[in-house]
Every structure is written in structure tokens, then in C-alpha cells.
Image: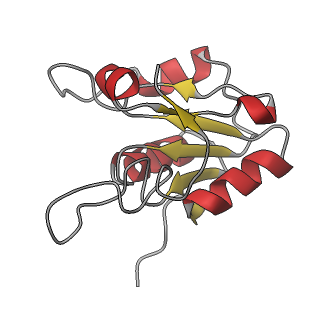
Amino acid sequence: MTAVAYAGDLGPAEAYELLEQDPDAVLVDVRTRAEWAYVGLPDLRRLGKDVVRVEWTRYPDGARNDRFLDDLAAAGVERERAVLFLCRSGVRSVAAAEAATRAGYARAYNVAEGFEGPLDADGHRGSRGWRAAGLPWRQS
């Protein structure tokens, strides 16, 4: 079995609980600008927090954001904080958590299932993930 190259996976409810309990924990949404605008964002206002938005891949060309770690630092995400990475289904966020871990973020987590969850048997998203868990979210 291969070791996880980041702090670990958290389900959406576990991620929200960590954000709630740790005042320094930060949620980084690594989806694209289009996803933030048209699909929605987690809403952490009840916790007195904002979601940090840093694209893992750029919109519209889908190219990898080579400035990802620089953008993360520029957003004020410090290496000693718990950093929870979220994407659509939990794939890009794994890559982001791995990259952050290699860069010295010791507490980089992946939010498993992401915002919309993986495809179901009918090829649809939405039956799992942040929104399906009933966690706060909003349209921008």
C-alpha cells in the first residue's frame, strides 16, 4: 500500500467540523473561476471565514496553474495552518494537497468527494460531496 503524500482525506462533514473547531484552518477551493461563478462556493460566513480561491488548472484552457504555490502564498495561506483543498470531485484537490505538502504545508488535506461529488451510475454529479452533505454554500 502506498503512503498518502499529504495529511489525509476528510469527508465534507469532517472538513467543515475542522474548519469550525480550528480558527486557523483554511479552505482553499482549487476549482476554476467558471466553476466558482456558475456552480457555487462553500459558504463559511457562519464561521467568520472566507473561502480562498486558487485555481489548480486555469480557465478556459485547462492548463495547470504553474503559479499555484505562489498564488497560495499571496492569498495569505501560511504553511503551519491546516489547509483543506476542495475541488469538484476530490481529484484536483488531491494533486493540490500533494503539491502543498511537498512545498512544506505539513497539514494539507483533501476534501474527499469535493463540492459536487463523483459521477453516479447515471453519469450525474450531486448525490455526494459538500452540497449533498447539506453544508452551507452559495451562488456567487
Lateral position of residue 119 relative to residue 68, left or right: left
**Residue found at x 43% / y 31%:** 40
Rendered location of residue 9, percent (x, y): 54, 64
Q: Is residue 66 visible?
A: no
Q: Quadrant of residue 125?
A: bottom left
Q: Depth check: 70 or 24 in front?
A: 24
**Residue found at x 34% / y 54%:** 126
Of all residues, the one furthest to the top in this rendering is 74
Rendered location of residue 109, percent (x, y): 58, 53
Quarter of the image for the N terminus: give it.
bottom left
Q: Please say if 35 is above or below 22.
A: above
**Residue found at x 14% / y 21%:** 61
Q: Depth check: 71 or 102 in front?
A: 71
Rendered location of residue 115, percent (x, y): 43, 47
Q: Depth check: 91 or 104 in front?
A: 91
Q: Quadrant of residue 17?
A: bottom right
The colour scheme applied to this rendered structure is secondary structure
Rendered location of residue 3, percent (x, y): 48, 74
Lateral position of residue 75 relative to residue 5, left or right: right
Lateral position of residue 96 relative to residue 121, left or right: right
Q: Quadrant of residue 128?
A: bottom left
Lateral position of residue 36 relative to residue 20, left or right: left
Q: Is residue 111 visible?
A: yes
**Residue found at x 28% / y 30%:** 57
Of all residues, the one furthest to the bottom in this rendering is 1
